[in-house]
Image: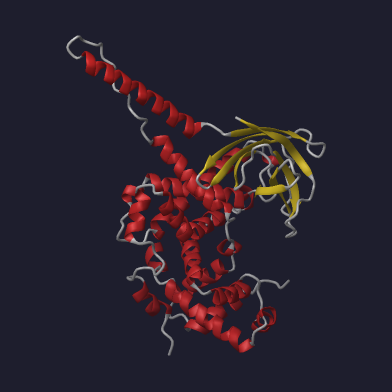
């Protein structure tokens, strides 16, 4: 591993390509460019999962401000408007059902899971809610008291089917708090587990399970 | 004779960015269209994340700030000018959000200083100044405009500190090819970064 280029070395690369600066302002500008190019933050790619999280966060924000279908007030029936009143009440009832349906689809979960800590993390626990969306199953995992990890390890969540095949549904590094994961396959009948994985490019599970629990149909 | 950085950037400052979203896509984002939100993220997610990562140093906090940035952008979407590239507007939101998260994390950890992790951003350093953050997102956007061949050379030079010969060895190409790609990439960067000073002064 090389030492990073010196400030002068980085500046020389730029000056070689575009010519020497003409004044102190340009020198300052080139120095800033060199500094930013040497910063890992400039080059780091966000995880692919972040795209889902962003789209989902905006959708959640939009849902939270969308007005609910309004239910017109049901008036007392009068003899003169009797027929229309019955129709009005029926329409109002249908709107109430529709409103309940919208609420049910927007805030409920299709599956849930309660995860307990294994002997590797006995004090850890978590709950998860899973909901079918157009993009797949959105899994919100709320974990607590997982052991903090060093920078060479991360957590990975898996859905393990009854056939024993485990499918990775996302990675995270926080030991407490809520993370959103995604699965293309239905969680029905599966077991949700969380493992500790070394940062070694090996896609297979390490087998170091810290949380596990069955998925329940909600 | 090569143009000065200022001469190269004068033209650049007044022209539209080649990768900017179209008017229709920006209008769709204003309407909350999920496809437009995805398109906005794919075009500007890297620069937003870079700003957040630069301020917060931790990728989990940077991801959180990135999500908040796009939510706030959508909430304020009626203020987007569909005739202008929204990169600067998004970057401004990203800076504010990231600094808010930074301050929140600083306060959260201040109560138990002994428990603060050694790499806690609030302990390691103050957040970068706004001028530096502007440079971050503009450089990131400029990098995204380079070809992959050019970007990898610049990254190996500036981030990994490799010489031309070392890069040639790693990439399996001639030293002359490395030099020409480096030269071309840096000239493009200088051009793409044309409005750096104008937007940060």
Q: Nearer the viewer, residue A158 or A3?
A: A158
Q: Nearer the viewer, residue A136 or B5?
A: A136
Image position, residue B71 (x, y; %): 44, 46
Reply above or below: A65 against B59.
Answer: above
Seen in the image, is A186 located left or right of residue B25? right
Q: Nearer the viewer, residue A110 or A118?
A: A110
Residue name at image x 47 percent, y 34 percent? A106
Q: How is the image coloured?
A: secondary structure
Reply above or below: A156 against B49.
Answer: above
Which quadrant of the rendered structure holds the C terminus of chain A?
top right
The residue positioned farthest toward the right in the image shown: A119
Seen in the image, is B89 located left or right of residue A135? left
Image position, residue B144 (x, y; %): 50, 68
Q: How many marks?
A: 0
Q: Is residue A172 visible?
A: no
Seen in the image, is A191 located left or right of residue B50? right
């Amino acid at each position: 591993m090389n030492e990073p280029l010196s400030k002068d070395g980085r500046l020389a690369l730029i000056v070689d390509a575009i010519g020497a600066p003409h004044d102190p302002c340009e020198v300052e500008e080139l120095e800033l460019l060199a500094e930013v190019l040497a910063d890992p933050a400039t080059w780091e790619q966000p995880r692919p999962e972040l795209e889902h999280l962003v789209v989902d966060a905006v959708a959640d924000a939009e849902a939270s401000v969308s007005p609910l279908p309004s239910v017109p007030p049901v008036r007392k029936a009068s003899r003169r408007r009797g027929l229309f009143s019955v129709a009005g009440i029926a329409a109002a009832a249908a709107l109430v059902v529709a409103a309940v349906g919208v609420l049910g689809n927007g805030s409920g979960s299709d599956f849930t899971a309660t995860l307990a800590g294994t002997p590797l993390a006995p004090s850890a626990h978590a709950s998860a809610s899973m909901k079918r969306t157009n993009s797949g199953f959105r899994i919100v995992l709320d974990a607590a008291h997982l052991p903090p990890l060093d920078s060479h390890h991360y957590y990975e969540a898996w859905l393990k089917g009854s056939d024993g095949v485990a499918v990775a549904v996302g990675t995270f590094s926080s030991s407490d708090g809520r993370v959103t994961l995604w699965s293309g396959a239905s969680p029905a009948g599966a077991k949700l587990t969380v493992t500790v994985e070394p940062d070694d490019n090996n896609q297979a599970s390490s087998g170091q399970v810290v949380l596990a629990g069955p998925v329940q149909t909600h | 004779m090569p143009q000065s950085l200022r001469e190269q950037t004068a033209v650049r400052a007044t022209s539209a960015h080649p990768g900017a979203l179209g008017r229709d896509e920006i209008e769709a984002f204003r309407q909350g269209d999920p496809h437009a939100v995805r398109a906005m993220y794919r075009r500007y997610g890297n620069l937003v994340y870079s700003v957040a990562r630069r301020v917060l140093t931790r990728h989990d906090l940077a991801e959180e700030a990135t999500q908040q940035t796009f939510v706030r952008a959508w909430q304020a979407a009626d203020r987007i000018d569909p005739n202008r590239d929204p990169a600067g507007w998004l970057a401004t939101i990203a800076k504010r959000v990231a600094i808010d998260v930074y301050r929140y994390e600083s306060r959260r950890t201040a109560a138990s200083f002994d428990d603060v992790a050694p790499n806690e951003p609030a302990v390691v350093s103050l957040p970068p100044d706004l001028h530096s953050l502007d440079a971050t997102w503009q450089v990131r956007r400029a990098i995204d405009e380079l070809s992959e061949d050019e970007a990898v050379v610049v990254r190996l030079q500036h981030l990994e500190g490799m010489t031309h010969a070392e890069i040639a060895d790693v990439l399996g190409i001639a030293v002359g090819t490395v030099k020409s790609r480096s030269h071309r990439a840096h000239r493009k960067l200088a051009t793409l970064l044309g409005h750096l000073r104008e937007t940060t002064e």
